[in-house]
Image: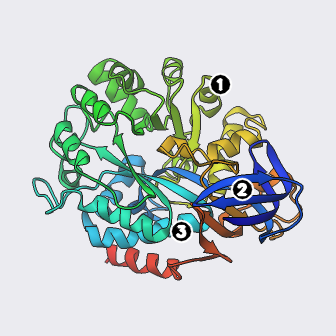
Amino acid sequence: MSTYWARRAWLPDGVAENVRIEISDGVITAVSAGEKPSGTVLSGTVVPGFANTHSHAFHRALRGRTHDDRGSFWTWRERMYAIAGALQPDSYYRLARGVYAEMVLAGYTSVAEFHYLHHPERGRRYADPNEFSHALVAAAADAGIRLTLLDTCYVAGGFGKPTEGVQGRFDDGDAEAWAQRVESFRPAGELARVGAAVHSVRAVPADQLATVVRAAAGRPLHVHLSEQPKENEECLAHYGCTPTELLDKAAALTPDTVAVHATHLTGTDIAALAGSWASFCPSTEADLGDGIGPARRLAEAGVRLCLGSDGQSIVDPWFEVRALELHERLASGQRGRFDAAELMTAATAHGASGWSEVGAIAAGQGADLVHVNPASVRTAGTDGPGILFAATGADVTDVMVAGRWRVRDGEHIGIPDVAGALSTEIGALWQ
């Protein structure tokens, strides 16, 4: 058993002073406030590890290289496809290793990887058809982050259209073949789990949705939902209903379902999502000009909110959680749309990715802790929960995942030069 003492810690009922935390076998066994220092002293503020509920690791290669593009999501997508076409399992392992380490440095302790890059090219297969999946699991293990590999079904290039070009690397042929491949995959290590995803209603025909839902039973099921008005318009033209209504008809909306983005929804859509999750990715939604989703309305309808870094234009959970509130302020003209407790709940919603035993500093919870400096130029003068509105990833000094330190004194243990690793791999992809 290990004992830690935190000057301040964010507990389920708020920020407390002088907190003793006892940990055994990667699990918090006891927490008490008002204690004298003992064990390892953490002189700053300790918060639960953050959950990244939506990630495309390879999009990190686009950061700083598409910022001045004119056009829309659809023109940006062509740049993204070029990177998808260049990756191989070994290069994706090296890139993802750096991306996941960057996440841990910022305070993320779990990541849900929305994974659809599966094959060498159309019609071909690696000797192990899950070669890319193994690469991502290995990368996450090296970085020391909990991984939910959301194996993604992507078998159409649009409504009534086959996949084309690089999309052939995503395509298993049909949902049944996808399900068989997913069932054959067994990730290595205790910090990796497997979930499922419908890329979108554009990429999985309606008559194949039920196959994905059956294969996902008992696992998280994520789906890009109404990220763009064009998707809604084409779905209405093709099926006569919204994407949310189409998923509802396929029994795809369950307590294990996470609707990613959920930006352009009708009132009927919002009601149908009650009891499910919605993953907002504010930095990416702003970067791609997607729009501002109805976060407050979803929460009031009984939809649980969570957050993701998506396209990795920014990897900083502190930014994402603040942006959830700030985007609401921009859309509504009102302040205080979410209080600090609501925001922290969304930021630590590991349950959306199948880690329901993680997300709070409390007995019985997984020992994921983030220690942040409360006296940097950004955090100086903040008090209590105000740290959530001031800190950035640069203020994180130490990160523990499952009882094991992964970051100490601002340095990643095991990957000492994360920036160098990222620079090397991204540079090679753009040559």
User: Comparing marks 3 and 2, which lies closer to the viewer?
Assistant: 2
Q: Residue 300 carries which label?
A: 1
Earlier in the chain: of badge 1 and badge 2, it is 2
Asked whether, in this view, residue 353 is left or right of residue 37, the answer is left
**Residue at image mark 3:** 102
Q: In the picture, residue 35 is in which quadrant?
A: bottom right
Q: Is residue 290 visible?
A: no
The spot of residue 392 in percent (x, y) is 69, 62
Check disc 1 and give the amino acid type. Glu
Where residue 337 appears, x then y in whole percent?
74, 35
Q: Which of marks 3 and 1 is nearer the N terminus?
A: 3
163 or 115, nearer to the observer: 115
Residue at (45%, 79%) from the top-left corner? 421
Kindly tell me whether residue 11 is visible in this rendering.
yes
In percent of the image, x 21 and y 43: which residue is there? 178
Q: How far apart are marks 3 and 2 (CA)?
A: 18 Å
| Residue 29 in the image, given as x and y percentages of width and height | 68, 53
Q: Residue at x 18, y 48 (%)?
A: 164
The residue singled out by tag 2 in the image is: 47
